[in-house]
Amino acid sequence: MTLLDVRGLTVRTADGRTLVDDLSLTVDSGERLGLIGESGSGKSLTTLAILGLLPDGMTATGSVDLAGTQIVGATEKRLAAVRGRDAAVVFQEPLTALDPLMRVGRQIAEPLARRTCLKGAALREAVRGALTQVRLPEPERIARAFPHEISGGQRQRVALAMALACAPRLLIADEPTTALDVSVQAEMLDLIDSLVRERKMSVLFVSHDLAVVARVTDRALVMKDGRAVEEGAVHDLVRLPREEYTKALVASARRLESALDLRSAR
């Protein structure tokens, strides 16, 4: 069953520049799709368009069907009902998703309360469980902290806990490990892989790094200058890329052989 169906998506600026050009992709229930491309390729704008979160001055045309809801042209009320429930996002920099003036526990409690109607001690225990699930030590301390009082890796795990709080059917991960050091990055990738597998969720994983995408996805679409240039199984894209651009991404992929070995072991 198709969960996300994007057809002819085009994103333009107010002055008419095309940043995403006639893009089509699908993500089935339980499937993991990687969206690969260098900075400026349009991949992050694609994810924002899928959630109806494009910046002011940008418009989307085409069709984005997310779990039966047409996103392009939808009202904010309709979009609010979709976000969190049908799809949730983890951004590259968690501070873009976290309120710097609100304690971590409250930020996780709000989506949990909306989904479950829990209150009081039961809600606090659910927050603790959410933090424990993303493998954060001392969840009570983390819940009391403000975002600036915890590390970058911990903030990214908090952002993941928030994204999963409403049990979305699709997790959109937009460069979720780029700002982390290598060891923390590997831990975060393993965590995402484990939680997605456990919850049988769909994933749209965005990255400039083919080696990272190979860790957590089954199929990938390569973007360049706002357009899709190649698509296929990750293994095939790595072993037998057709396009020169894809070949360049393969050649520059960090820890490529290690990623392939891990992928083969899955």
Image (cartoon, rainbow, N blue to C red):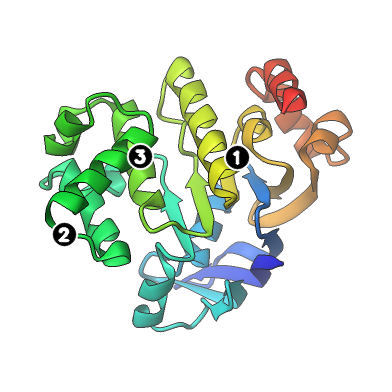
Which residue occupies the foreground of this view, 169 or 36?
A: 169
Residue 83 is marked as none
Q: Quick check: 170 above or below 237? A: below
Q: Secondary structure at mark 3?
A: loop
**Residue toward you, 11 or 86:** 86
Give the x, y percent position of residue 230.
79, 49
* C-beta proximity under 8 Å, tags 3 and 1: no
What is the tally of numbered marks visible in this picture? 3
Residue occupying the point 67% across, 49% down: 33
Q: What residue would you read off at disc 1? A: 38
Crowding at dot 3, Cα within 10 Å, few <14 / some 14-19 / many 20+, comes out as some
Spatial CA distance of label 2 from label 3 is 30 Å
Residue tagged 2: 119
What residue is at 51 percent from the left and 52 percent from the top? Answer: 171
Q: CA distance from mark 3 to mark 1?
A: 17 Å
Q: Work out which quarter of the rendered image holds the C terminus and state it.
A: top right
Asked if labels 2 and 1 touch by Cβ distance under 8 angstroms, the answer is: no
Image quadrant holding the N terminus, namely: bottom right
Q: Which residue is mark 3?
A: 93
| Spatial separation of the CA atoms under disc 1 and disc 2 | 44 Å
Q: Amino acid at mark 3?
A: Glu
